[in-house]
Amino acid sequence: MKVRGKEGIFFVLLLCCCAAQVRAEGGIGVDVGLQTGYRLDRLDWTIAGNSNGTSPNILSELTWSDIQIAHIQGSGELSLGREKCAGVSPRAFLSLGYGRIFNGDNQDSDYARNDRQGEWSRSNNSTDAGSVLDLSYGLGTRFFLDDDKLTLTPMFGYSYHEQNMHITDGWQTIPATGSFAGLDSRYETEWGGPWFGLETGLHPSDKLQFSLLFSYHFALSYLAEGCWNLRHDLMADSFKQKATDGHGYTVAVGGDYFFTKALNFFINVEYRSFTVADGSEWKYFTNGNVSKTRLNEVNWSARTFAGGLRYFF
């Protein structure tokens, strides 16, 4: 975690202070969970030939597909008992996830003419190492309806995400010269921004619970840096990218089975889609020169399949 990690630490301390105050009054609930799962990511971006977005409008295109990740996530939630608030339960929550990339594909294409015409170089490579990090925190209020069989929780918060990917096992497809040695490049991203959402819960029995969450992310910022290790005309920190005012959404569907009132097993399926556009890229050359061009667009999608245990204190 980089700069924005300080915001997460501040928020945890704030939650602890709030918890101490509410606990002193009596009526706080603590929900702690740990889940493991499998995540599948895709990321792509393009740059133009210059800052005006021309010559050509797509100069280079990088795509990471089928990025397979072993993922683990911890979560915590503080809630004020609804009996204190006539069917309404204020809550605060925090989740932190980490994953290791173990397989994936990368394609790097360069074009001579507009609209992906005149592709003169393409390499198809591996992305079988690296890591991801996810942090989300927020506040919400749960409303209990229909004799507690239905709950609605509007909420808002902030999320931060990292992807740290390595590119190896180079294979030149255009021109078709095949394998080339020494490829060990990296590409690292940061996404961050506020969100608001709504979670709907259905409770058909004391043992079963289902949930649907939709959140909309806005004012997303994007920062990235890369090292093209075979470009000897570029510095070790070869280039940086920046874009702001992106947007996206997350949809999650979950199910819980309660062994006891304090312990349950849950599964969760989540889909996330983020995009930013109209950014900039700076390349740093070994002779001291810096060139700037347009970052056309960055797209990221992630599918997560997870399950685990949750304990209520």
Image (cartoon, grey):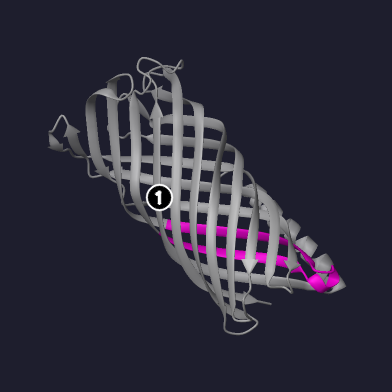
Q: Position of residue 1 (x, y in %)?
A: 54, 49
**Residue 266 drawn in magenta:** no
In the rendered image, which quarter contains the C terminus? bottom right
User: Where 116 falls versus 186 (above or below)?
Assistant: above
Q: Position of residue 300 (x, y in %)?
A: 45, 43
**Residue at 44% in and 65% down:** 37
User: Considering depth in this image, is 45 or 149 the residue closer to the camera?
Assistant: 149
Quarter of the image where one finds residue 144: bottom right
Q: Which residue is mark 1?
A: 41
User: Considering depth in this image, is 230 or 309 the residue closer to the camera?
Assistant: 309
**Residue at 60% in and 64% down:** 75
**Residue at 62% in and 80% down:** 205
**Residue 82 drawn in magenta:** yes
Q: Position of residue 68 (x, y in %)?
A: 36, 55
User: Where 252 falls versus 204 (above or below)?
Assistant: above
Q: Which element type, helix, strand or loop, lies under badge 1?
A: strand
Q: Please indicate whether residue 286 sits to the left or right of residue 97 in the image.
A: left
Question: Magenta residues: mostly which secondary structure?
Answer: strand
User: Where 192 falls versus 296 (above or below)?
Assistant: below
**Residue at 67% in and 65% down:** 77
Give the magenta-colored segment's residue range.
Answer: 70-99
Q: Please indicate whether residue 289 sits to the left or right of residue 274 in the image.
A: left
Q: Position of residue 247 (x, y in %)?
A: 56, 39
Can the viewer see residue 89?
Answer: yes
Q: Please indicate whether residue 289 sits to the left or right of residue 272 in the image.
A: left
Q: Amino acid at mark 1?
A: Asp
Can the viewer see residue 1?
Answer: no
Quarter of the image where one finds residue 34: bottom right
